[in-house]
Every structure is written in structure tokens, then in C-alpha cells.
Amino acid sequence: MRAVGEQALLVEVAGAAEVGALYAWLRERQAVGELPAVEEIVPAARTVLLDGVADVPALAALLRAARPTAATAAPGPLVEVPTVYDGADLAEVAGLWGVSPEAAVRIHTAPEYVVAFCGFAPGFGYLTGLPEQYAVPRHATPRSSVPPGSVALAGPYTGVYPRSSPGGWQLLGRTGLPLWDAAREPAALLAPGVRVRFTAVRGDRD
């Protein structure tokens, strides 16, 4: 744990599971008024940033005594993502996994995912839950434009592109679900702790 400026603390942990447990623990303490005033709690791959901290020493002492575990985290809301599995990289991913494209779809739709953290673009969530053996590499040369709604894999994460942007993730399919809507409250459909299920559906090109 280290200070970031005068009103922020950065907590470093071992990995995504520990980030999720700490983030959930902090939000629970915040909800019941047991956390010193904090403006933002921002999880990442191996860190949690607490920004706008009113009493840094008090919060630091609380964090040093904390022992959050994944078991203490209350499950977040569930979002179902209907997905047409016709992505440009589906066959390549299936080959990396040593299965048919149909089996790759079954593998990807089997787990319940959790949004570990957000980043890259507004509304983009990094989802964990796919078993470790199915991690895949990014493309060596990113695409100049990935369509919005693209369901993709990179390393251990699954993600859904909320808008058109460059990207090097492996594309499995697409969804029409709006991931980001500035007129909606909240604007982002996916936030840390939200559970996600992908369901295979037929598309207009089937």
C-alpha cells in the first residue's frame, strides 16, 4: 500500500481474485458507514485505487487490518449478453483450444463471468471466469477498427467492445446489447462485481 499524492492510496494485491474481494469489502464497509470518506474506489488487474480520501491515516490503518476474502463478497447483479458467435477469430480460437468452433462456443458460454475491473474505453469491462487453460494471446498486429458489440478474448479476460475502436483481442462474436449509453443511469452496463452470462443466439446472417 502506498500514497498517491495527498488524498489517495494505492493497494497492491496478488491478482484479480484478491482485487475482487478487496473491492467488495470496501464497498460493503462504505455502504454501512464504516469507511472513511472516499470519492472513488477504482479496481484494476492487481491494484485498487482509493481517491479523494478525507482521512488517509485512518483509511490506511483500516486497510492494514483488513482481511477480505472472496467468500465475503456479496454476488453482484446478473447481466445476460445474447451473442451471435460468428466472430472473425472463432475458428482460430477453437484451433488454439483444440476443439471445433461449436465446442468453443459451448466452452465460452459455460461459465458465469464477473467484471473484475473496467478500462480501455468507457463501458469496457474486463471479465474473469473463463478457466485458465483457455487464455489466448492478443493479435500481434491490432485491427484498426473493431465493431461495437464485439465479444472478444485476450489473455485470461473476456470483453465486449462498447464502441468502434482499434483492438487486438480475438473476436468470437457480437451482441446488440448497448454497453455504454451516456443518457442512461448508470451509463455503463458493466461495472466491477457485475456477473455476466453469455448466451448463444442466431443472428441476421445465419
Image (cartoon, grey):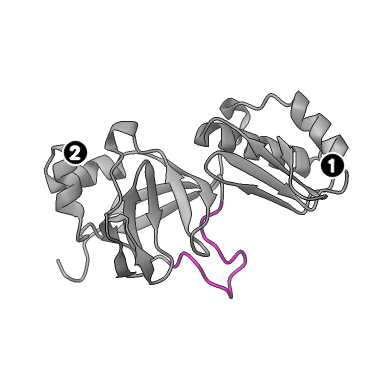
Q: Is residue 65 above or below residue 28?
A: above
The one of 71 and 133 positioned closer to us in this rendering: 133
Q: Which residues are magenta?
A: 178-191
The local secondary structure at tag 1 comes to: helix
Tell me if 98 is positioned left or right of 124 in this view: left
Which residue: 14% across, 48% down? 101
Tell me if 33 is positioned left or right of 68 in this view: right
Q: Earlier in the sequence, mark 1 or mark 2?
A: 1
The one of 9 and 74 positioned closer to us in this rendering: 9
Badge 2, how many Cα within 10 Å: few under 14, some, many 20+? some
Q: Amino acid at mark 2?
A: Trp
Q: Which residue is mark 2?
A: 97
Q: Is residue 41 visible?
A: yes
The local secondary structure at tag 2 comes to: helix
Give the quadrant of the N terminus: top right
Give the image location of residue 93, x and y in percent.
Answer: 20, 47
Give the quadrant of the C terminus: bottom left
Give the image location of residue 110, x and y in percent.
Answer: 30, 39
Q: Which residue is mark 1?
A: 56
Q: Is residue 164 magenta?
A: no
The one of 111 and 56 positioned closer to us in this rendering: 56
Q: Is residue 149 visible?
A: no
Residue at the extreme left of the image, as rendered: 100
Give the image location of residue 54, x and y in percent.
Answer: 87, 48
Tell me if 88 is positioned left or right of 192 in this view: left
Which residue: 53% across, 53% down? 118
Q: Is residue 37 above or below residue 122?
A: above
The answer to whether mark 1 and mark 2 are in CB contact below 8 A is no
